[in-house]
Image (spheres, rainbow, N blue to C red):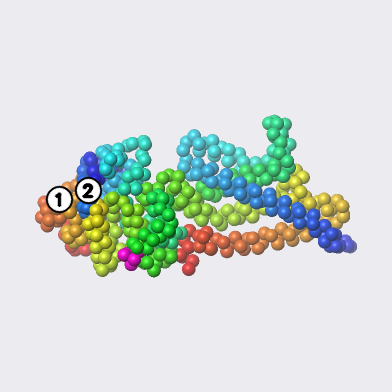
Amino acid sequence: MNYHWDFSIIWAARTTLLHGLLVSFALTGFCILVGTILAVPIALILARRSPVLYGITNFLVEIVRALPILVLLIWFYYVMPNLLSVSLSAFWTAAWVLAINLAAFAADILRGGIVAIPREHLEAAEALGMSRVTVIRRIIIPETFRRSVPALTAMYITMFKFSTLASVISVSELLHTGDSIIINTYKPLEVYTIIALIYLAVIVPTTYAAKALERHPMFSVNPGDSE
Amino acid sequence: MIKVQNIGKQFGGKWIFRNLTMIAKPKELIGIVGPSGCGKTTLLKCINGLLRFEEGMVTVGDLRLMAGSKNHTPVAIRQRVGMVFQHLNLWPYKTALENIIEGPVYVRRWSKKQAIENAILWAERLKIKDQLGKYPQMLSGGQRQRVAIARAVLMEPEFLLLDEITSALDPVLAGEIVDCMVELKEQGMGIVFVSHQINFIRRNADRVYFLQGEQFMESGTPKEVLAEPKTPELRSFIESIRHGW
């Protein structure tokens, strides 16, 4: 191939790319924070299996899990305003869709963590006279998160990758920013290569950091075993 | 006072015990003996409200636990009746100190400083002060047992239910724990003690209940029950303990 590579355009567009990266971080950060907070009560309901609440919650979770994120994004951005007269900006639509999607999957991870808590750990708390709410706050939630750290961190990293889907509704995250640079420079190969490298530069160290985190006493179920 | 009145518990349609009646008063040490699987642990869990029961009633002072009650809210009872489990049930991701102060801080609402000060006093008494920063998996069986005891007694319950707590300890350590229990009893705590250690019960219990075949077959002072067993079941149980099965 006689393609003439010219990476100088990347340097010229560095501020735009940085802005796109920050938007991707913002989308992912919101989605992780809100999605995880939403996932906790959902997981508690799914683990408790009280008939009515479980039925409704499980049904909603299954719908979200069944729909591709792309479809959800398009539906929330283009269809929902017509149906419900509620419209959000492209950024907030993407942020909420990603958060809802994460909540549905993270809830299942957390439900598994709750179910895996040995009965004895709950009995010990109950025997001390802890109320149901205190048992949830002091024992179930912390232990569930410790049990779910590996699966959750993998999910969070995946959400960072899924944030690229927001480009279909014109959110100026990293990939969409790259597209606008390409329109002005006609240099798609350089731009997409740099975008790929930026994703690698973020995701690879994060993956290693997440693995190190899993072994840290703060995030382990049996911290004494690793010493 | 703990009053157990005609309590009955079944699992999967099979009665574990029925019509059990017993009383435990403050400053009293009650021993419950019986062969493995006769329902001793289940009985303690019913008293503490950890297990529901099908018949009878448990009262602790003015608090009541009724059989089959849908409004099963034994939290208040549990705050007055502590329990140490046979398998200890320590939280593996909390240090010994964190295990011990969890109840006082989040149930009794003590300040963390106050809880830690009291935990250290108990840890000194139970000889685990140097182990407070360690996780349960890093401790020996005996040290874990003492952490579990400290966790229960720091809550300052009126009664303590102890399920085979000296079973994993060597005789010297078991003796020290037993001395501690006797001291607690003298300070006014009522203790219900499930154990196979007939000698300890003979020396320290005020009353003994022998549980077998769904009921208390014998009860009375240790002298009445253990020195002069009336039923062949108790005789054979005492024999089997002596022969160390």
Which residue in the protein does label 1 denote?
Answer: B220
Q: What residue type is labelled 2?
A: Ala
Residue A16 image label: none
In the foreground, B159 or A39: B159
Q: What residue type is labelled 1?
A: Gly
Could you give the CA–CA distance between mark 1 and mark 2, rounded to whole angstroms?
A: 12 Å
Q: Is residue A80 above or below residue B91?
A: above
At x 71% / y 36%, what residue is drawn? A87
Q: Is residue A43 above or below residue B206?
A: above
Relative to B32, A144 lies left or right = right
**Residues at discs 1 and 2 in contact (Cβ within 8 Å):** no
Q: Give the range drawn in magenta.
A: B123-127
Q: Is residue B124 magenta?
A: yes
Relative to B218, B191 lies left or right = right
Q: Does the magenta stretch include residue A109?
A: no
Residue B123 in the image: state x and y as whole percent.
35, 64
In the foreground, B214 or A219: A219
At x 62% / y 41%, what residue is drawn? A64
- The residue carrying pointer 1 sits among few (fewer than 14), some (14 to 19) or many (20 or more) residues within 10 Å by Cα, namely some
Q: Which of marks 1 and 2 is nearer the N terminus?
A: 2
Residue B24 image label: 2
In the foreground, B131 or B18: B131
Identify the secondary structure beneath mark 2.
Answer: strand
Residue A177 in the image: state x and y as whole percent.
79, 51
At x 61% / y 46%, what residue is drawn? A34
Residue A195 in the image: state x and y as whole percent.
76, 57
At x 54% / y 35%, what residue is drawn? A56
* Subunit under mark 2: B
Identify the secondary structure beneath mark 1.
Answer: strand
